[in-house]
Amino acid sequence: MLLAAASSAVLAAAQNAPALAESTAESTAESTAQATAQAAAPDEPVYRLGQINATAQAAGGTPVGGSVLTSEDIARFNRERLDRALDLLPGVSIATTRGPRNERYVTVRGYDRFQVPLYLDGVQLYLPADNRFDLGRFLTGDLAEIQVAKGYASVLDGPGGLGGSINLVSRKPTRELEGELRTGINLDTTGAFSGYLTSASAGTKQERFYVQGGIAKVEQTFFRLSDDYKPTANENGGRREGTESRDWRVNAKFGFTPNDTDEYSFNVLKQNGSKGAPLHTHDPASSQTMRYWKWPEWAVQNLSFNSRTQLGDKSYVRTRLFHSTFDNKLDSYDDRRYVRQSTSRAFTSIYDDRAYGGGVELGTDLIPRNTLKGAIHVRRDEHEEFQTIYAPRFREPNQTSVEDTYSVALENTFHATGAVDVVAGVSYDWRDLRKAQDWDGTNTGRFVTYPTKDMDAFNWQSAVIWRYSATGETHASVSSRTRFPTLFERFSSRFGGAVSNPGLKPERAINYEVGASEQVFGNTRLEGAVFVNDLTDAIQSVNILYNGQSVTQNRNVGSGFDRGFELSARTLLSDRIEIGGNYTLLVRTLDAVGTPEPKPTGTPTHKLFAYADLQPVEALHVVPSLEVSSTRWTSNSAQTAYYRTGAYALANLKVSYEIVKGVEAEAVVRNITDRNYQLMDGYPEEGRSVYLGARYQF
């Protein structure tokens, strides 16, 4: 019974062994027709071509580690946005940005969004200017699973996986006709309407082809603060101003399967959104840190082609081609009325970015007891921007930056015995900066062309995996990876408060891990890992004097040393009672330059998630859950003082009832106790809220 529950991944957070174990397990399966047939089994709605080397299955189909959050997990805990879904996992913590950007992100064992690349069906989503993706904009309704590699991201997947990787895997139809309709509304603690969700998807799987499509829309008009929030001049409580957002997403997939081993698919994704930005609750209105921003446009479009072709009995080739566009618009206003743009603080900023490229992976078992894989990745990123300022009114000329990124990787798995694998991987990454432009000044300004300094890096990793029983495995790994700085980190003037550093070097981290998993007492799964992260050449903003003015500049002056462990468990107490959860300890040490001394912000030392799934009768599920987080470091807006936010515990409850087969009604209460808490100084989180919805599956 537990294996059935595990296959639906009640809490894939419990599957916290590193990506390396999955990558190793894939070594034999990936290159055989039998494994391909298993991957295409009718009971698995996962788009296997969209997976990266972070998850796979051992021979025989037994999962061996890796963090995988399935669509069942997401629906069970009602996590409709990506940041909240990822927060279910051990080692992953939700965070929010400082200032008016109003962005949500996650950290993975202390590594932030710059150090943990984001993928969609194996294609890296990368913003050429600053790579500051807002994970709160990504919807989860059309995902089959989310893969998270922690510490060890295979070099085969391309550059940048310094601290791991996150891959969003879309759905693939498994029946002749299938689909899902979902709708629901959000209410605040007073019962007032605060937003809605609606989505639809449908697909068909035929003998030699499949088609899948979907659409989703989520709108939030506001969220209500806790009744325990103390009003300030900037925020009087109740409905939090500036928290409105609108997001919609459409996708389509067309696949061709000419035989039992080969597959070719074209994929289209388009996502648009807009959002406000709440004010810092207690910064003075005259402060330079107080900005009145809105984001009327945030758009992502991705076209991709994925394929897998069997070459004889022992080899295969996989290809990926993609073209992506990223567009966004930022409006800065004079004051909190968000009407006038007439002063020096007002502007409109436009970003128009494009990326295209591809990759090829070749694998073979021709060498006895070895599985050898190689991969090549090529990518071009083009960034174009301009600003319109209003005092005096002037539209800057378009500024363009272009850079190419390449990666060559090799990985070999030595099958020492039927139960022991030894993995070794190396890669060489390089980035060619072809153009980097900026505009200096206003209508009397000039173009600035920055030095086009290139950079390169060598990466290596190794692991040993021992599957000592049919239900247990243990592993040890080490991974040395780099991360190239973004255009923003090298060249951004931060509205006149910073100077560029074209010579900024890549960051490097060496990550160590020892972990194990086992099934005990027949129906209990236990998993754990101990990890150490050693970060050097960390990029940090430091204060300097430039032309007699105090400004900041990014430099490679920091280092970090993080360590901790993760524990996960799940068990069936009976046919109708299941419990589970995970705990993370993360101790971070930051050696950095600054006054006051910078602190490792955004991550709690202790994090706990626990749940129960109770089924009093066949059609009824009652799912209480608890999220606990200890204090975390934060700073004031000027970064002149650091302090710890308060710890918090959030109690949640979901009740779902299957009215007739395929039709389900659900009610969710989040933050039942109306806890007042914050993740970042000056930005309190939502109080108690209610979701009422229905879902129809066919």
Image (spheres, rainbow, N blue to C red):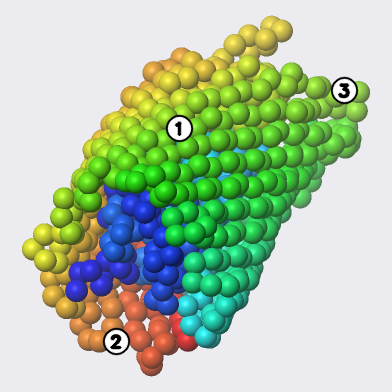
Image position, residue 50 (x, y; %): 52, 58
Quick check: can you spot residue 432?
Answer: yes
The amino acid beneath tag 2 is: Ala
Image position, residue 133 (x, y; %): 58, 46
Q: Quadrant of the N terminus?
A: bottom left
Q: To which residue does mark 1 refer?
A: 426
Residue at screen point 34% across, 58% down: 57
Q: Residue 441 versus residue 366: which sits nearer the camera?
A: 366
| Element under disc 1 | strand
Q: CA distance from mark 1 to mark 2?
A: 51 Å
Marks 1, 3: nearer the viewer: 1
* Badge count: 3
Residue at screen point 52% across, 18% down: 556
**1 or 2: tag closer to the N-terminus:** 1
Q: Is residue 208 left or right of residue 610?
A: right
Q: To which residue does mark 2 refer?
A: 619
Q: CA distance from mark 1 to mark 3?
A: 44 Å
The amino acid beneath tag 1 is: Val
Q: To which residue does mark 3 refer?
A: 446
Q: Residues within 10 Å of mark 2 (few under 14, many from 20)?
A: few
Residue lying furthest top in this view? 548
Image position, residue 71 (x, y; %): 42, 67
